[in-house]
Image: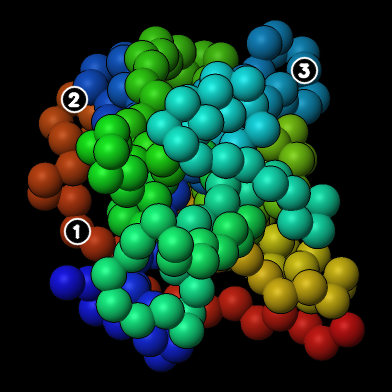
């Protein structure tokens, strides 16, 4: 028995997830949905901009591998407003009682990702699997602080408004221009994305951003901004205090 939403439907919405675990020089990545992990790469010392390495791939329903899996489980993919979505097959809202062969089933183009955590509505009773799969893609990447300058984890509210290369270079220029205790890179990315949503007169999607700046051993120190911490990966994060500043909001100007 699932809890009900205000409309009386089962509350079964899920979430995307991009997770990293760093152990020594290795970064372990797990990912479902359309949040993403991007690494800013400086190939040569003479480069004035960074390249963006997209570590994850969005799980879109139209991808051949995802669409084949969805259809194999009895699901389907339909377009709504130009966006491919996994179809929610549910009894018409006026239906009462058990579902029978004669029950009218509505097919609603619903979710724009093929994998997520917790989209319980997509459970297929015949196969015992979720049409919207919770199984993540995983990968391991070797980090080199001489080349890899930033790791950005962001939800689609960021990436729908900002190409990965723009995001990593915004962090790169931000650390050069903003003095200590200024706005953090993560907050600047998030606030900029929200401003772009507002300028386009669109309702902003969920916008969450985490930025890790990698310090090259023996290199110049990275400036510390508000809400940022320094972690020595040799000793771990257990005894690092949370920054706890009062600078936890950004103002999006009216346009």
Say whether disc 2 or disc 3 marks the residue closer to the N-terminus. 3
Whether residue 186 is visible to the viewer of this picture, yes or no, is: no
Q: Which mark is residue 241?
A: 1
Q: How many marks?
A: 3
CA neighbours of label 3 inside 10 A, class few (<14), some (14 to 19), many (20+): few
What is the quadrant of the C terminus in the image? bottom right
Q: Classify mark 2: helix, strand or loop.
A: loop
Q: Are marks 2 and 3 in contact (CB under 8 Å)?
A: no
Residue with the mark numbered 3: 47
- In the displayed structure, does residue 118 sit left or right of residue 75? left
> Residue at the spot x=77%, y=13% of the render?
46
> Residue at the spot x=11%, y=45% of the render?
238
- Nearest the viewer among 137 and 56 is 137
Q: Are marks 1 and 3 in contact (CB under 8 Å)?
A: no
In the rendered image of this protein, does residue 203 appear above or below residue 16? below
- In the displayed structure, does residue 93 sit left or right of residue 177? left
- Find the distance from the CA under tag 1 to the CA under tag 3: 35 Å
- Nearest the viewer among 192 and 28 is 28
Residue 22 image point, x, y percent: 28, 27
CA neighbours of label 2 inside 10 A, class few (<14), some (14 to 19), many (20+): few
> Residue at the spot x=42%, y=43% of the render?
132
Residue with the mark numbered 2: 234
Q: Classify mark 1: helix, strand or loop.
A: loop
> Residue at the spot x=84%, y=76% of the render?
201
Q: Which mark is residue 216?
A: none
Residue 192 image point, x, y percent: 72, 63
- In the displayed structure, does residue 3 sit left or right of residue 124? left
Q: Classify mark 3: helix, strand or loop.
A: loop
């Amino acid at each position: 028995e699932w809890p009900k939403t205000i409309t009386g439907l089962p509350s079964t919405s899920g979430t995307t997830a991009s997770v990293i675990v760093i152990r020594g020089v290795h970064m372990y990545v797990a990912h479902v949905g359309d949040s993403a992990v991007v690494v800013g790469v400086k190939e040569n010392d003479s480069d004035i901009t960074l390249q963006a390495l997209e570590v994850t791939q969005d799980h879109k329903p139209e991808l051949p591998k995802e669409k084949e899996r969805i259809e194999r489980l009895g699901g389907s993919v339909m377009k709504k407003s130009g966006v491919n979505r996994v179809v929610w097959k549910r009894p018409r809202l006026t239906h009462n009682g058990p579902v029978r062969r004669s029950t009218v089933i509505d097919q609603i183009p619903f979710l724009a990702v093929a994998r997520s955590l917790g989209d319980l509505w997509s459970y297929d009773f015949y196969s015992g699997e979720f049409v919207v799969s919770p199984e993540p893609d995983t990968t391991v990447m070797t980090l080199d602080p001489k080349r890899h300058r930033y790791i950005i984890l962001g939800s689609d509210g960021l990436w729908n408004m900002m190409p990965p290369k723009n995001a990593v270079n915004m962090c790169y220029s931000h650390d050069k221009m903003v003095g200590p205790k200024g706005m953090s890179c993560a907050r600047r990315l998030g606030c900029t994305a929200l401003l772009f949503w507002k300028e386009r007169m669109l309702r902003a999607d969920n916008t969450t951003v985490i930025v890790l700046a990698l310090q090259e051993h023996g290199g110049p120190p990275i400036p510390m901004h508000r809400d940022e911490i320094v972690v020595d990966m040799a000793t771990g994060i257990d005894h690092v205090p949370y920054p706890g500043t009062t600078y936890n909001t950004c103002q999006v100007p009216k346009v």
